[in-house]
Image: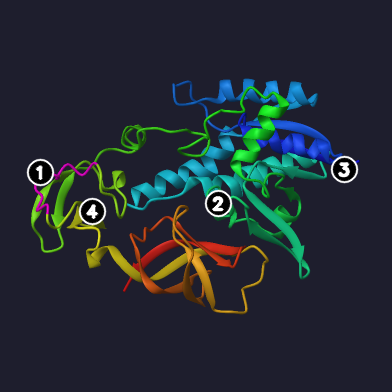
Amino acid sequence: MEKVIVGMSGGVDSAVAASILIEKGFNVEGLFMKNWEDNSEFCTAEQDYKDALQVCDKLNIPLRSVNFSKQYWDRVFKDFLNEHKKGRTPNPDILCNTEIKFKEFYKYALNLGADRIATGHYAQNQFIDNHTKLLKGKDSTKDQSYFLYGLNQKQITNSIFPIGNLNKKDVRYHAKKLGFTNANKKDSVGICFIGERNMKKFLSKYLPRNPGNIITTNGTNMGSHEGLMYYTIGQRRGLGIGGRNNKQKGAWYVAGKDMENNELIVVQGHEHPALYHRKIIGSNLNWISGLKPIQQDLNAKIRYRSKDKPCKIKILENNKISVKFHEPRFAITPGQSIVFYEKNVCLGGAVIDSYKN
């Protein structure tokens, strides 16, 4: 009987994933990962472990616990802080998947005798044309393939995504039917394993504030900011300049950051041309298949909640890529990832370094 170790988060998705594997006849065990050392109100690890334990007791499977906090700090959180120092907006959930969930967890599971691992991600994988492809999850509102673009063939092939072909409402129905106490548990939000926090307060614990001026594209001083690391391209709320507003032109948005002069650049109106660009240069390029795609015309999304849009790619040296969208995209953000798709297949992606028209 094939042994599968499931990453149990304490949430409903991994709980139902484990139950489905049991129904299919796998030898299932659970593993709870603690990746952040924090006793604050934002860290829910203690309650999450209790919820995971309740599920495993209900399913009559063992639950182990492992602490990857050091690995998370060294390989995910340090990068998170360094990116913010550079004025970029990183997505630590992507690196967490690549470095922790599908590397450290995977290695740990193999040492426990697992044949494969499983998670509660809304994604699917299929062996097609001599390699394993990563597919979007059935529930388009929950699809998490975007966060998994950094994985390789070994990681994808040896992983199972039991709920990838389900909608969220079906997952909750399944959990209620099995009597899980976490059936209605709120979905986790915020930074991977750190939780939902006030980002400004959180970052200020690790990075010193560095106030500067807020200026328009024509050089008008609009006020002051507390540090460029606290803002992201396309941000509208929390700028503190709403009073200086020509209402006919709309709200103010962050359009850029001048790191050399420590200035936050803002424009007025969602349709301002300074917020829209077509070309991207990305780095740390990864193709899940290990092979670059034959075609240059693909679809891509520039953030998790954005829609796939058509583009043309050109592979560059030093693991970089040039991308040109057919139509300008709103608020392209350095530090975020651009992820490429061919229909419902996630091909891979890169970290956004720069943008232009």
Q: Amino acid at mark 4?
A: Tyr
Q: Residue at x 46, y 47 (%)?
A: 79
User: CA–CA distance between discs 1 and 2?
Assistant: 38 Å
Q: Is residue 179 left or right of residue 251?
A: right
Please name the predominant secondary structure of the magenta segment in the image: loop
Disc 2 or 3, which lies upstream in sequence? 3
Q: Mark 2, residues whose alpha carbon is within 10 Å: few (<14), some, or many (≥20)?
A: many
Query: Of helix, strand and loop, which one carries label 2?
Result: helix
| Mark 4 and mark 3: Cα distance apart in space | 53 Å
Q: Are marks 1 and 4 in contact (CB under 8 Å)?
A: no
Mark identifier at residue 158: none
Q: CA distance from mark 4 to mark 2?
A: 26 Å
Mark 4: secondary structure: strand
| Identity, as a three-letter code, of the amino acid under mark 1 | Gly
- Please report the residue visible at 47 percent of the width from the left and 53 percent of the height from the top: 304
Q: Position of residue 336 (x, y in %)?
A: 43, 55
Give yes or no for residue 293 being in the magenta stretch. no
Identify residue for label 1.
243
Location of mark 4 (residue):
253
